[in-house]
Image (cartoon, rainbow, N blue to C red):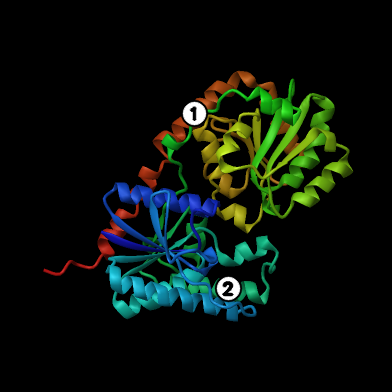
């Protein structure tokens, strides 16, 4: 089986998208499938047209000259199409596997039709919803409706659709795609790649000013949908009841300045530690400083439909967390067993969930064990990637005699 993947971007860039991609490719390789990997111009300019990164080989697409909105995207599509056709003619794949956004699906459809190769399209999030989150459009705008129509157009023309969760699958089926042509490949983790949480490094703890404190924390990118503003809103009430509590926010992103201003405005800046971005190799040291993680995502289409990786990674490390009850979390978390859910958007409910977890430490060992067992037995990449096999086998071109 030879699969040519068409990707928005890849490692060495770090994102949930690239980590999921790398895990899928490695597991497909472990199954004996031969995979090839093309990134779009969104990867940016690279030193070479082919790059080897962490044991995976990526073919790169040249970055076209920038242009105004619409023209820029069309140039990216055309550049990807040219590079894809060149590779497909050379490599002879059985399947073209495009990954969202639709800018990758369109060239795959065009090349697949031209060369007679089946095309599958994997939706990780809809392009129109991502644009709303980035603030470049609003739900229901002309651009939003046009982008949604383009995604639906692509879904109706590929041979099969994959997606990452049941929320997105229901949305795809509601667009008129037969349910039999949509398969969920759930987010998962490589359990072997995660060690159980360790003891906090005392030197780092002293440097962060956390000695003798209980620490609530978040590690990741500071996007609006993550709900870190809600976590800050809940923090003063928690601090009044628990003067030794500290909030550790590890990472950075678009909301960083506004979150720092909010902490000042609420009078808790002295108890909130912003570390800035830390090297990937150091992240586990910061996780070890945190007693309880918080994932307070706001309710919006993106978070209701899409399942995140962070709770699964936390379970793999035996870490404890509270999370909002958005749809993406409810698909992953068993409330009271592998984590604690609270009503999304409510600072009072978030504070109560944190208080409840801190008051009920006797249950922590059982929750750690249940979370680790869930990813070991259910949400691992071996199980997830196995669901590609029936579709690939059905679509793959017969080998010439």
- Assign a secondary structure to mark 2: helix
Q: In the rendered image, which quarter contains the C terminus?
A: bottom left
Q: In the rendered image, which quarter contains the N terminus?
A: bottom left
Among the 4 quarters of the image, the one containing residue 128: bottom right
- Front residue of 87/292: it is 87
Q: CA distance from mark 2 to mark 1?
A: 41 Å
Give me the residue at 39% from left, 35% from top: 377
Give me the residue at 61% from left, 29% from top: 288
- Front residue of 358/22: it is 22
Residue behind mark 1: 370
Q: Position of residue 283 (x, y in %)?
A: 59, 38
Give me the residue at 67% from left, 25% from top: 203
Q: Position of residue 290 (x, y in %)?
A: 65, 30
Give me the residue at 32% from left, 71% from top: 88
Q: Height in image: 294 above or below 101?
A: above
Query: Which one is earlier in the sequence, the residue at label 2 or at label 1?
Result: 2
- Assign a secondary structure to mark 1: helix
Among the 4 quarters of the image, the one containing residue 333: top right
Residue behind mark 2: 147
Q: Is residue 114 visible?
A: yes
């Amino acid at each position: 089986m030879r699969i040519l993947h068409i990707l928005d971007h890849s490692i060495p860039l770090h994102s949930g998208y690239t980590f999921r991609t790398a895990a899928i490719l490695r597991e497909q390789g472990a199954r004996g499938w031969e995979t090839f990997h093309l990134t779009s111009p969104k990867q940016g300019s690279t030193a070479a047209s082919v790059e080897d990164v962490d044991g995976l080989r990526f073919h790169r697409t040249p970055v076209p000259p920038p242009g105004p909105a619409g023209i820029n995207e069309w140039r990216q599509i055309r550049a990807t199409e040219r590079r894809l056709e060149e590779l497909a003619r050379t490599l002879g794949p059985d399947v073209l596997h495009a990954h969202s956004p639709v800018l990758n699906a369109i060239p795959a459809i065009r090349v697949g039709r031209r060369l007679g190769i089946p095309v599958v399209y994997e939706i990780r999030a809809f392009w129109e919803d991502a644009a709303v989150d980035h603030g470049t459009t609003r739900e229901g705008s002309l651009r939003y409706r046009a982008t949604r129509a383009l995604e639906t157009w692509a879904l109706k023309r590929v041979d099969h659709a994959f997606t990452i969760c049941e929320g997105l699958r229901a949305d795809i089926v509601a667009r008129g795609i037969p349910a039999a042509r949509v398969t969920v490949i759930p987010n998962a983790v490589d359990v072997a790649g995660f060690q159980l949480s360790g003891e906090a490094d005392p030197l780092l703890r002293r440097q962060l000013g956390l000695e003798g404190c209980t620490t609530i924390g978040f590690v990741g990118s500071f996007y609006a949908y993550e709900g870190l503003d809600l976590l800050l809103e809940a923090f003063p009430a928690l601090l009044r009841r628990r003067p030794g509590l500290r909030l550790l926010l590890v990472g950075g992103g678009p909301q960083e300045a506004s979150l720092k201003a909010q902490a000042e405005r609420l009078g808790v800046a002295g108890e909130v530690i912003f570390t800035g971005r830390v090297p990937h190799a150091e992240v586990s040291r910061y996780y070890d400083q945190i007693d309880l993680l918080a994932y307070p995502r706001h309710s919006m289409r993106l978070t209701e439909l899409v399942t995140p990786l962070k709770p699964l990674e936390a379970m793999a490390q035996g870490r404890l967390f509270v999370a909002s009850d958005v749809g993406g979390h409810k698909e992953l978390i068993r409330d009271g067993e592998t984590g604690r859910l609270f009503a999304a958007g409510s600072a009072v409910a978030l504070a109560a969930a944190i208080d409840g977890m801190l008051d009920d430490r006797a249950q922590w060992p059982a929750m750690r064990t249940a979370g680790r067992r869930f990813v070991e037995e259910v949400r691992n990449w071996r199980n997830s990637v196995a669901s590609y096999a029936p579709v690939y086998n059905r679509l793959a071109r017969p080998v010439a005699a």
